[in-house]
Image: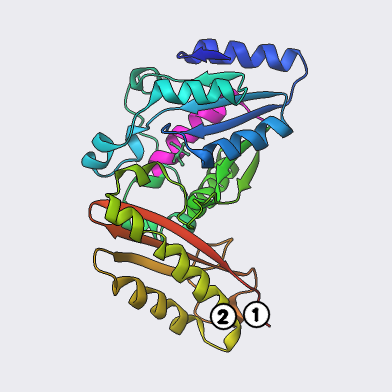
Amino acid sequence: MEIISTVAALREAVAGARTAGLTVGLVPTMGALHAGHLSLIERARKECGFVVVSVFVNPTQFNNPDDLRTYPRTVEADCAKLEEAAVDVAFVPAVEEIYPEPDTRVFDLGPVADVMEGAMRPGHFNGVAQIVSKLFDYVRPDKAYFGEKDFQQIAVIRRMAEIEGFDIDIVACPIKREADGLAMSSRNVRLTKEQRELAPVIHQVLSDNADMAGDGLDLVSLREMVIEEINSYDGMEVEYYEIVDPMTLQPLGSWDEAKNGAVGCITVWMGDVRLIDNIRYPEIN
Ligand code: PAF
């Protein structure tokens, strides 16, 4: 594995792979790698002859300076994991390499970026579009891999790719969970022992709620049940729970509107740690 820190060297490495006729896969990450990331890499490894993984804590997508400051940074351990996973290139740039000057681009991300994370974290998705568009431009991958834990982010990236004209297969990979159901996330290490013990409640409540969908309950009641139940635990506070159309990300008012299916997306605060998760509801009708 090559560890590369400049854009010029990255472009050169990818050009070599192209000349060799290899399919190029990109897995963008912010490091603090866990089994969720490794599952994306494994999939990329299976489908592509040349795999690039970026490790970069992108400052422009953090709307909260404390969150940026406390975001876990474990570059050495990350590189060891990437080596083990037989990645071809680990791209680990400094902030100045990516942003020699401020990125002032504002993307027209449309309605998918206005709701939920977009409404709660102003500027977040524009920052994601900035960094991912740069990575897409440097690598020009055939395929790029993203985890479905950040369900809305995938829709936003698809939109960015469409408006920027990137012909890239965006591959959405299933959420990887701990044995107790908690969605794997780099932020989980910030939970206290007590918070960590309680955190699986989020997935438990969501899956119970999805199981109840066939019992004739309407979407409004199902949504309220989730919010009420999670908020009933000391130390948990729901920021939002929305049951949305998986393509448009717009909240659904009734099962009749759920032509593309329905996905429940949640954000829960546990102390100063913000956890997100989602669940797909079974098809009704
Ligand atoms: O999902 C993430 O880790 C980040 O938002 C991403 C896609 C790597 C962009 O910084």
Q: Which residue is drawn at 51% across and 11% down?
A: 8
The stretch in magenta equals 126-141
Kind of residue indicated by mark 2: Ala
Tell me the quarter of the picture where residue 285 sits.
bottom right
| Image quadrant, ligand 1 | top left
Please tell me how many numbered marks the rendered image carries: 2
Q: Which numbered tag is attached to residue 284?
A: 1
Asked if residue 180 lies in the magenta stretch, the reply is no
| Residue 169 horizontal side relative to residue 205, left or right | right
Q: Main secondary structure of the magenta part?
A: helix
Tell me the quarter of the picture where residue 276 sits.
bottom left
Q: Do the residues labelled 1 and 2 touch (CB within 8 Å)?
A: yes
Tell me the quarter of the picture where residue 280 sits.
bottom right
Q: Which numbered tag is attached to residue 213?
A: 2
Q: Residue at x 48, y 21 (%)?
A: 79
Q: Residue at x 63, y 42 (%)?
A: 170
Q: Is residue 229 above or below residue 19?
A: below
Which callout, 1 or 2, points at the residue further toward the start of the chain?
2
Q: Position of residue 242 (x, y in %)?
A: 44, 69
**Circle 1 residues within 10 Å: few <14, some 14–19, many ≥20:** some
Q: Position of residue 74 (x, y in %)?
A: 37, 27
Pick the quarter of the image with the N terminus: top right
Kind of residue indicated by mark 1: Ile
**Between 204 and 214, which is closer to the camera in this rendering?**
204
Element under label 2? Answer: helix
Asked if residue 136 lies in the magenta stretch, the reply is yes
Element under label 1? Answer: loop
